[in-house]
Image: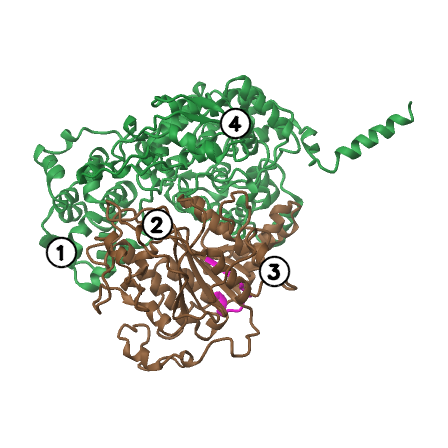
Chain colours: A brown, B green
Amino acid sequence: MFSRRLFLKSSAVAMFGTSTAPAWLSRALYATDAPSPRKKILVAIFQRGAMDGLNVVVPHGEKSYYDLRPNLAIPRPDGTQDSVIDLDGFFGLHPSLRPLKQVYDAGHLAIVHAVGSPDPTRSHFDAQDFMESGTPGQKTTADGWLNRVLQPEKTISPVRAVSLGPELPRALRGHNEAVAIDNLNDFKVRDTRGASAFENMYAGTHDQVLNGTGREAFDAVKRVQAIDKQPYTPAPNVHYPPGKLGQNLMQIARLIKANVGLEVAFTDVGGWDHHVNEVGGKSTVGQLANLLNDFGQALSAFYLDLGDRMADVSVVSMSEFGRTAKENGTRGTDHGHANVMFAFGGGIKGGKIYGDWPGMEREQLYEQRDLNLTTDFRDVLGELVTRHLGNQHIGSVFPGYDQPKFRGLLGA
Amino acid sequence: MKKTLPLLTALCCAAMLPAERDYAEFDKKISIDQQILHALDRLTFGPRPGDIEAVKAMGLNQWIDLQLHPERIAENEALARQVGPLVEPKLIPIEQLLTPQQIRLLRTGTVKEARDLLATLPPEKAEQVLTQMPVVRQKVGAAVAKGVANQTGQAQAQLRQLLTPQQIQLLRTGSDKEGLDFLATLPQDKVAQVLALMPAVRQRLASQLDGDMRMMVESAAKDKQPGRAQPGQVLAQAKIYRAIESDRQLQEVLVDFWYNHFNVDAGKGADRYLVTDYERNAIRPHVLGKFRDLLEATANSAAMMFYLDNWQSSVERPAPRIAAVKNAKQAEHGLNENYARELMELHTLGVDGGYTQKDIVEIARCFTGWTIDKPRLGGPFTYNDRMHDKGSKTVLGAVIPAGGGKADGEKVLDILARHPSTARFISRELAQRFVSDDPPPALVDRMAKTFRDSDGDIRAVLNTLFTSPEFFSQGAYRAKVKTPFEMIVSAVRATGAQVDNAGPLVKQLTTLGEPLYRKLEPTGYSNVGEDWMNSAALLARMNFSLKLAQNQMQGVRLDPGKFSAVPADAARQLLFADAAGQTLAAIDKEIGDQQSDPGLVAGMLLGSPDFQRR
């Protein structure tokens, strides 16, 4: 059971302007309550470029980690600003992820380690493709797992599946309608005279493809523009960081609160491919630190902004593969294998690190160079799909993978 | 006898029909006027006013033949003037630009000294220095290099609107104190704007600004600042100019096609500096030549070797014990299969072309040693025999004996270029681009035959395509959805708009879903028109159309008054054909009895379903 005092103790609680924690945090958010009648929502965040999981959720209890990374390892937890933030005595967070510590301590943030795709490819595009299509090793899958998750409904919202960005990602391609929105405010035809002419034109055209896309577009526009015209204000004292990820998550929060029928959302954040100069002069400086700063703030802002609503919303992050256990000759790391996934919200039992730690001694490493895989990414996504979204047809969401081993993020 | 025949025929038809997709539309001819429009739609980036008449005057077949021989078409002088400085900057020898002391300082001085010196140079000079001295580029870092690249052209113009030349010079060459004293006299947001446009100066002075000011400056710099050079930005602008203005239209269409086929992402590390050369020397010269030559040129390019990681691919060696040797060998990571796989899957045979995982490994072994000299400095392609796997290999059944060198890879290119699957794969892709998303197999077969018979002569294959009955058929006519690039360029061409600055159009393409030279995956951008249709993209096309036609598109000029006030007539001006009834009805309904706004009507036509097809 979470204690309010924990929050008051922590000094880095910048997002709380007041001295008392918001009331909703002291309530238990778990399934013991009556199930929410509102739709469950899944938000997927793709970290493109292969995030270095070992430097993000640091196995500070593992001696090999320090042996293999004399320049890049994050210092063992000692209370100082640049050292690992301990989580459970063995693992800890990179210090730039400080905002997520609160979410972890509140029992809401779950971490899965040594997780990823079993396919041996170390090609970014192949691996991203496999993770988004949900069929590692198979190049011929035309659609994506996040699209296949959607179940037939009586009434379908035109914005049930949304990706934030100009392009519809692989993960959302498929038979079900999915919309790519770059900016909610711009998601319309700006000139109203043009808008109605276009709507009529496309509704009346014999061109089937354009007729369909036109209808989809204008339906989605109506839903989105019906949202309050005022600029969005997040919950009190919540500040989303200015980068693209923060802004995208804020827009997803806005869509959720506006009750437009959103079911799945997708966004991505790039730049994790640190072959060179991954870590600066100290751990809180440099490329990885910058990205984690942004990542941590964006996720915790979303969590705090949604507040109560987090009971219906699960967020999960993933990256195509991890990075080498050993640092390379250019202060970076190269493409590896297993990685880390974060998940919170919707009844997920957080405050824990899931998975089986394979160890980092030479013989324990995958091909003697990378962190070994002990959980398939589909085990994690599959559990969220069945237990959070309630889609029992796991075999159609992840073809060829109908016997997943759930880790228990959402129950026994 | 007579009675049984019809039964037999009926049985035969019944047996054939269910499994076959109906390509009957490709048997129906189109009128001569439609043929001319169709040829312009497919062989160019869209007709301009007067094009149809010109083709008629020349004769359709003669015009097609001329396009197939771009060397017979005079180069467009105005285009050369616009594009030249963008992609082929005249290189002035460094010794003419800098003193020996300056050169020595740049080469051997500290990072700070090098940056400070660069900050004192006018941007064109700094750009020359960075282009010709990769060691310096490496030293001063990507941020400063990018900043210098920014400063030519657009950013310069913006800066001149904010400060006088003397003030600009002061910031560049004056002391830190003089620079800061001057900045202190400006309003805060102006300081932020100025420093956003002068990154080298910013680098020097930022640490001496107070906290708030510094944050403002940093955020202005990070913002969507004008002229911020994305990788491939300059090349993208040149591409737009060429597509709009070049008289060698088919050539430019094919450069687009082949670049996509042999895709390289300008956003990947050193490729940023390599793609210009790649397009100019590996792609453009070969677009209508022999496929084998094109294939070879791409394989021998630093751009491709870097993009698909082959530059690191090496025969496995035991780890050296001496540290110095270890560091030198850090680039040798063992075998990398990336290039070998994509070479077969995407460049030649196609995913169903009949190869195995073993073939991928064997081909990768053949290409070990095909690498880059000083990769992170954008060095040229080179073959390094030390990295080459000299064992014998078996590729698609052919044995390549041990002891070979670069010739191993060349043998693979021979095998792949001549493989029947390649003839079919390439022919189908060309047919997808020029005929329809799902081209009739009979046509593809004939093109593949020409490919084989002519030893991969692209011009010959295209000739088979353009003279085929399927090309000038109902099945092909207006069958393709325009890609974002095709949509934007055809709109500019149809309206006769003038592009003064292609930068905003390049940005607009990102909103429409096709950031030029930035396709991450080696598959390149899709040839299937329908892949481009999604809600956000369609809305973006509509918004672009209204902006362009009402002369509100940054960097582009046009006079909406030149469009007819009568929608049906304006449609013929822009579509070069009649608009659909529904389109005109929707427009009439909107403008009603009001005084017609020609820009608005033109915008509605450009965003209509009619204009989205070619």
Chain of the residue displaying label 4: B
In the image, are marks 4 and 1 on the same chain? yes
Chain of the residue displaying label 1: B
Query: What is the C-alpha distance between the residues marked 1 and 2?
Result: 50 Å
Residue A362 x, y percent position in the rendering: 31, 50
- Read off the residue under disc 2: A370
In the image, are marks 4 and 3 on the same chain? no
Query: What is the C-alpha distance between the residues marked 4 and 2?
Result: 37 Å
Chain of the residue displaying label 3: A
Callout 3 crowding tier (Cα within 10 Å): few <14, some 14–19, many ≥20 = few
> Helix, strand, or loop for circle 2?
loop
In the rendered image, residue A263 lying in the magenta stretch gets the answer yes
Residue B209 vs B396, above or below: the answer is below
Query: What is the C-alpha distance between the residues marked 4 and 1?
Result: 63 Å
Residue B586 vs B394, above or below: the answer is below
Which range is magenta?
A255-266
- Read off the residue under disc 4: B422
Q: Is residue B298 left or right of residue A98?
A: right
Name the residue nearer the viewer: B530 or B51.
Answer: B530
Q: Quadrant of residue B31?
A: top right
> Mark on residue A151?
3
Residue B587 x, y percent position in the rendering: 60, 50
Q: Is residue A161 left or right of residue B384?
A: right
> Helix, strand, or loop for circle 4?
helix
Which callout, 3 or 2, points to the residue nearer the camera?
2
Residue B309 vs A107, above or below: the answer is above
Q: Is residue B32 visible?
A: yes
